Amino acid sequence: MPFKWVVVILTIVQLTHSISSPNAIGSDLTILISNDILGPQSPSADSGVILLSPRSQVSADSACKVLGETLWAPELQTASIQSNLDYLTFEGKYSADQQYWIASNATAIRAIDGKGHISDYTTFSPGLRLPALCTQSAPFSNISVQDDSQRWQVTVHSNNEYITGFRDRLSFRFLGVRYAPQPKRFTYSTPYTGTGGNVSATSYGSQCIQAGSGSDGSEDCLFLNIWTPYLPAHGRGGENLRPVMLWIHGGGFTSGTANDPTFDGANLASRGDVVLVAMNYRLSTLGFLALDDGVTNGNYGLADQINALEWVRTNIKDFGGDPDRITIFGQSAGAASVRAILASPKARGKYKAAIPMSNLGGGGYGTTYSSWLTIDEGMSTAGKQILEATNCSSAASTVDCLRALPASILQTLSTVARYLVMDGTYLTSLGLDLTKAQDSLSDVHLLQGMMRDDGGAISSYIQTANVSQAIASNALLSGFNTSVVTESGLFPVPEGSNATLNVFNVTARVATDSLFRCIEQAAAYAGELNNVFAPNSYFYEFTRSYQTINWSPNAPVCEAPKTPTHPNGDPEQEYFKCHSGELYYVFGNILRMGYPLRDENDLPFEQFILDSWTSFARSYNPNPDKGLLKARGYNYTSLQLEIAGQWAPISKSDIVRFPMRQLQWPSKQAAFRDVDQCAALGWPLDLYVT
Ligand SMILES: *[C@@H]1O[C@H](CO)[C@@H](O)[C@H](O)[C@H]1NC(C)=O
Ligand SMILES: *[C@@H]1O[C@H](CO)[C@@H](O)[C@H](O)[C@H]1NC(C)=O
Ligand SMILES: *[C@@H]1O[C@H](CO)[C@@H](O)[C@H](O)[C@H]1NC(C)=O
Ligand SMILES: *[C@@H]1O[C@H](CO)[C@@H](O)[C@H](O)[C@H]1NC(C)=O
Ligand SMILES: *[C@@H]1O[C@H](CO)[C@@H](O)[C@H](O)[C@H]1NC(C)=O
Ligand SMILES: *[C@@H]1O[C@H](CO)[C@@H](O)[C@H](O)[C@H]1NC(C)=O
Ligand SMILES: *[C@@H]1O[C@H](CO)[C@@H](O)[C@H](O)[C@H]1NC(C)=O
Ligand SMILES: *[C@@H]1O[C@H](CO)[C@@H](O)[C@H](O)[C@H]1NC(C)=O
Ligand SMILES: *[C@@H]1O[C@H](CO)[C@@H](O)[C@H](O)[C@H]1NC(C)=O
């Protein structure tokens, strides 16, 4: 039946021509762009090119067409591509003399070298193979629009399936990639392996069901998203593999998703030249219920995170990521997750570095994020109430009784489980041991820190001029010895004209210290003095912030005051630098989210923070490489390094004076803050140092 065969072959040819893949093209695909202002408004927005591996001129021309592009040409009058060439030279991938195919003109076949000189290659030997530069015209995506039409799609073979994502202007995007089958409720998720088929990764997978998620939430939610500037052909990649940053979202272990546009990885991947992965994990009772039945031991959400880490270890090289250079990072409950992963025997050796951002711990509401419960305590804190509320207490199998209920009922009970527990498998202790050096942590590089006023978003603004009453009425500060605050003289009430704001200043300080700062600083102090982590760890405090627009508790106190000269807020005025106020900076997404730059320093600061975080992922040092900055034209970050100097690691010899970097424009080294207050509250700096 020869006729049918012809049809089949044509179909395959059509497919490979319509959806590109590095394997079909036989080339690594690298998106290079001068991502200077982190938004489509940039004058260099059209400076992007796609780099192809060395090949003949004819093959370069046709490969660009498969990508829906053409060979790049100076006549296109795009913004300068010189910084892309300089970066290739800086990386050592090619020398400055390297020639790259570009488009022919009417009279000549042409190549451009690393210095930007264009030469006539009309009389080259026909076998000559050069790397090539295609145009990169895929549109920018943003918070509301993405163009995933077939022209921009790209297929990668990984995990025994063909995964089709797409590219936007800045990076390749693979959204909603499954890392685990839907788990049986209250059991650990298992690794997912494809069945040889084709799957789409052009739109997000379901978020994990949570209170308020409605039909967007599901128990089948164990997906991750990948943003990468680089796709190697045939899983090669070798020394070109990029560092990987694995993001764990926050949300109190009861809410949140990796699909949150705040965490879109396009800018980190593109400007920072890293592979960003963000995963969903089970939340609330479905993620963290522990019962005393000997089987339902809890930590399902934590186990999901570690399962995702293993997926990354196994598969990320197919997406250009280096499995041996994984940095796990997370904020709030995501930082608490990082701390738990540091302690977990199940995660040992599977990552190289960690960035917990604004972890909670200490007292009140913060306690259980860093001091984990026994299963019995989990039972008495949440399990018992959940069984009672569901009438499952006296069922023959309490867990089967809970399995029979709709997920939405479990996630909206007045008590939900959101506690890490010592389950014996994922966590075998009641907290991260910082009291001594341990083999499991001695190679882990650590960058950690907080917002100056993390607690300003966590404590409530009580309308009172009475500090005792404000503390007593603050549910999340319950259990405190109020007289330490009112009688020690360590927490003076400021004398501003607004009496309730003066009191809020004190409760915010108590909340910041007791829910965040004291144990964070104690952890950094012990990490250094007890040699717990790899040499050179870093601590920061953000003193500039951009409060998340959709989450601004106690508004407007966490927001820069609006003034006639700064209608969107003046960050140089005093205001509370609250929880989550660093997220837009770290991900570089202010403009992508459609929000304004409030002053002339917001953008340089955003660039500087993104560059510092990705530098840490690359070299475990947050001080960006000066040569890299020069090659890529990141001149504001270079300027910041010139005026502010280096971010110094915590060092034993200077641990009193200069352990901490205050991240501002410009940044500076500083002493730990509120050391006396922390001691009075019961979490002294030497908490973990004996
Ligand atoms: C084509 O490019 C070559 C090499 O740069 C140049 O010498 C020549 O003048 C160009 N021809 C036209 C028609 O622009
Ligand atoms: C999957 O897609 C590829 C092209 O990327 C095609 O060659 C193959 O036939 C498809 N396989 C299935 C099972 O549909
Ligand atoms: C539990 O039983 C009470 C009393 O019979 C009933 O009102 C309530 O709806 C039940 N709750 C659930 C979750 O079935
Ligand atoms: C402040 O509040 C505390 C506790 O609510 C109360 O005992 C005290 O009398 C109040 N102080 C004043 C001056 O009102
Ligand atoms: C509370 O703090 C005060 C002042 O520091 C102290 O005198 C008192 O003993 C503390 N009370 C308790 C129960 O610890
Ligand atoms: C005090 O400050 C708060 C927070 O900015 C504000 O809501 C309140 O109106 C102010 N009160 C007075 C009396 O100005
Ligand atoms: C809180 O009060 C202190 C003085 O005790 C002051 O230095 C600080 O600026 C105040 N914080 C805010 C956000 O106003
Ligand atoms: C997103 O992009 C579309 C199309 O370019 C544009 O119309 C829209 O204003 C952008 N939205 C934001 C928030 O930037
Ligand atoms: C950085 O480069 C841009 C574009 O070339 C230029 O507009 C800006 O003034 C430079 N900034 C500094 C601090 O050199």
Image (cartoon, rainbow, N blue to C red):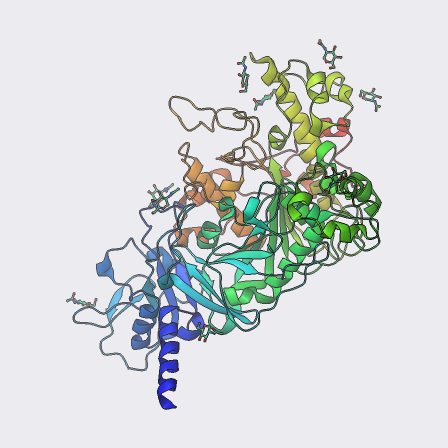
Query: Which quadrant, please, contains the C terminus?
Result: top right
Q: Is residue 257 visible?
A: yes
Toward the bottom, the furthest residue is 1
The answer to whether residue 175 is left or right of residue 462 is: left
State the image coordinates of residue 82 (x, y, percent, origin top left): 33, 57
Where is residue 225 drawn, in percent x and y? 53, 56
Tally of numbered discs: 0
Give the camera-side residue of 128 and 507.
507
- Whether residue 257 sits left or right of residue 138 in the image: it is right
Task: Quadrant for residue 303, please give it.
Answer: bottom right
The reply, left or right, for residue 440 in relation to residue 512 is right
Residue 626: x percent and y percent?
46, 51
Which image quadrant: the N terminus?
bottom left
Q: Decide if residue 674 is in sight here.
A: no
Instruction: Give the quadrant of ligand 6.
Output: top right
In which quarter of the view is residue 449 placed? top right
**Residue shown at the point (41%, 59%) measured from the top left:** 167
Residue at 74% x, 27% y is 478
Where 655 sits versus 497, above or below?
below
Closer-to-camera residue (556/338): 556
User: In the visual, does 168 lie left or right of 547?
Assistant: left
Q: Position of residue 157 (x, y in %)?
A: 50, 70
Measured along the vertical axis of the image, is residue 105 above or below residue 138?
below
Q: Nearer the viewer, residue 117 or 357?
A: 357
